[in-house]
Amino acid sequence: MSERPWKIPESVLVVIHTPALEVLLIQRADAEDFWQSVTGSKDEVDEPLALTAAREVAEETGIDCRAGSALACSLRDWRLQNVYEIYPRWRSRYAPGVTHNTEHLFGLCVPEPVTPRLEPREHTAWRWLPYREAADACFSPSNAEAILLLPEFAQ
């Protein structure tokens, strides 16, 4: 059995929302008080960010926004990034000495709230909230800030 490779400290955050600015939040399985948008790291260093975003959305919610899907044109790269310190509780997933992650922001507009298909090892619950309430419910300050940018990027 081979060891699991280190996580790549470059990730995406995808704010899934409706035209009415309702936002989908999902609850982490490993920290029940942590509500968040879809997040995930690149699988390969050279994996395109849009591919990472579409893959993570599909894995974490069952929503298909990959190339060729009906929602592919609704996945938008906001061309913003956050660099933040990795929470100590998750730092062991990264190579020794890695303490920071670069997170790239995306938005995905769906026509109306949908029922996501969660991966129970990762997330245990979901809810749709108006964007300001969603920002208040996020554990991550960078996730909350991204959600508060939604009116600007949803145009």
Image (cartoon, rainbow, N blue to C red):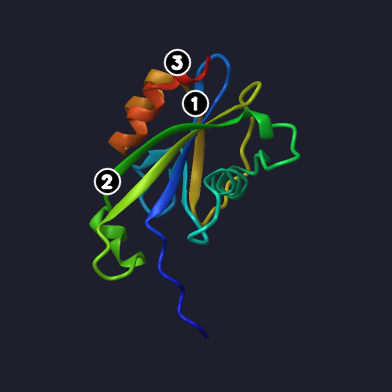
Q: Which residue is mark 2?
A: 84
Q: Which is nearer the N-term, disc 3 or disc 2?
A: 2
Name the secondary structure under disc 2: strand
Q: Is residue 82 left or right of residue 129?
A: left
Question: Gap in Å between the C-alphas at discs 1 and 2?
Answer: 23 Å
**Disc 1, SS:** strand
Q: Find out whether the residues at labels 1 and 2 contact each other: C-beta distance under 8 Å.
A: no
Q: Amino acid at mark 2?
A: Tyr
The residue that mark 3 highlights is 151
Q: Nearer the viewer, mark 3 or mark 1?
A: 3
Q: Which residue is mark 1?
A: 23
* Residue type, label 3: Pro
**In the image, is residue 153 above or below residue 146?**
above
Q: Residues within 10 Å of mark 1 (few under 14, many from 20)?
A: many
Q: Classify 135 as above or below 7.
A: above
Specify the label residue 118 is tagged with.
none
Q: Choose the circle earlier in sequence order: 1 or 2.
A: 1
